[in-house]
Image: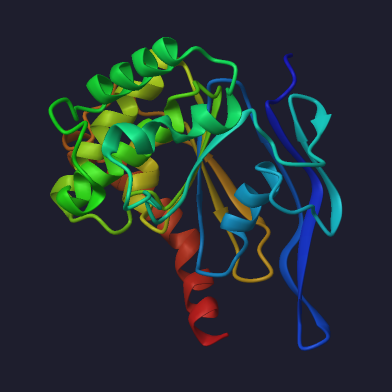
């Protein structure tokens, strides 16, 4: 059996507030296999984003360990790409220049011609050809998300960390982005750890869905999503199996959401 790409070994996280420790994530065990798409769902504040931040090396766990490809994550993890809730595009840079930014920072020795070729391929991949010289303020919300996705993918990370990346989009744009993501992940054989509040989104995209409890978060249920791939992200929602999965997982999730609201 191959080792997991991502492994949390009793990893926990406390944050200090007013001189006392506030537990965000209880000791948690979680594995993500190579080329697997795992979605994390749970109420607000249950530690889902904290998991991503620890895998990215943005801060260490308070207890336990976080491993990436068998090695302890002790500093910024440059082997992963991270797409946050906000697109964080730089308003003074064009689409092409925004996408090129990671290469400028992490691949300084890369020849300019190779960098330009990579950016051009990404622009083509996410359907932004013709908008290379547009600034973020001139792009629609969906285009900005495509640009942010291209920026994450441009240096070809094997693993994608995605934190509510499409949460602010309307239902129609969200479906378009789901199709784009499925195509890119399938073509590139990426590993994905995806945080969402949208249970339907998690089922439509993931190989496994992990349900977290209310804060301090811990894994309550892990469910394999045995829906055939490739998936039509629109039509799959009308399948009986999808409805059954949604009901099963919602029954696990609803009480946690109520606890999170009451907290």
Query: Is 30 above or below relative to 153?
Result: below
Q: Where's residue 15, x and y in %?
A: 75, 71
The foreground one among 3 and 187 is 187
Q: How many marks?
A: 0
Q: In the image, what residue occupies the spot 42% across and 55% down?
A: 85
- Residue positioned most to the right: 63
The foreground one among 15 and 216 is 15
- 230 with respect to 2 (left or right): left
The foreground one among 78 and 175 is 78
Is residue 60 in view? Answer: yes
Image quadrant of residue 145? top left
- 238 with respect to 98 (left or right): left
- 113 with respect to 235 (left or right): right
Q: Quadrant of the C terminus?
A: bottom right
Q: In the image, what residue occupies the spot 38% across and 49% down?
A: 165
The foreground one among 57 and 90 is 90
Q: In the image, what residue occupies the spot 12% across and 28% down?
A: 130
- 45 with respect to 205 (left or right): right
Q: Where's residue 30, x and y in %?
A: 69, 41
Snapshot colouring: rainbow
Q: In the image, what residue occupies the spot 39% across and 45% down?
A: 202
Q: Where's residue 115, x and y in %?
A: 43, 17
Query: Is 21 above or below relative to 198?
Result: below
Q: Quadrant of the N terminus?
A: top right
Q: Where's residue 108, x and y in %?
A: 58, 23
Is residue 241 in view? Answer: no
């Amino acid at each position: 059996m191959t080792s997991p790409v991502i492994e949390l070994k009793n990893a926990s996280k406390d944050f200090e507030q007013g001189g006392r420790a506030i537990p965000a994530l209880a000791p948690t065990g979680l594995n993500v296999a190579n080329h697997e798409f795992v979605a994390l769902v749970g109420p607000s504040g249950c530690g889902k984003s904290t998991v991503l931040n620890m895998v990215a090396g943005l801060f260490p766990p308070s207890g336990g360990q976080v491993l990436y490809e068998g090695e302890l994550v002790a500093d910024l993890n440059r082997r992963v790409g991270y797409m946050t809730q906000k697109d964080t595009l730089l308003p003074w840079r064009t689409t092409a220049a925004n996408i090129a930014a990671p290469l400028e920072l992490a691949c300084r020795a890369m020849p300019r011609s190779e960098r330009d070729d990579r950016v051009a391929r990404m622009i083509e991949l996410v359907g932004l050809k013709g908008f290379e010289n547009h600034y973020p303020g001139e792009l629609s919300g969906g285009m900005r998300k495509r640009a942010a996705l291209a920026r994450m993918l441009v240096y070809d990370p094997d693993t994608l960390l995605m934190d509510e990346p499409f949460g602010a989009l309307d239902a129609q744009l969200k479906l378009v982005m789901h199709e784009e993501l499925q195509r890119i992940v399938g073509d590139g054989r990426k590993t994905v750890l995806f945080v969402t509040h949208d249970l339907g989104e998690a089922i439509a995209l993931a190989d496994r869905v992990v349900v977290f409890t209310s804060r301090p978060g811990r894994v309550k249920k892990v469910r394999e999503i045995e829906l055939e791939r490739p998936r039509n992200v629109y039509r799959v929602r009308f399948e009986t199996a999808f409805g059954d999965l949604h009901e099963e997982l919602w029954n696990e999730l609803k009480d946690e959401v109520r606890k999170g609201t009451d907290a």
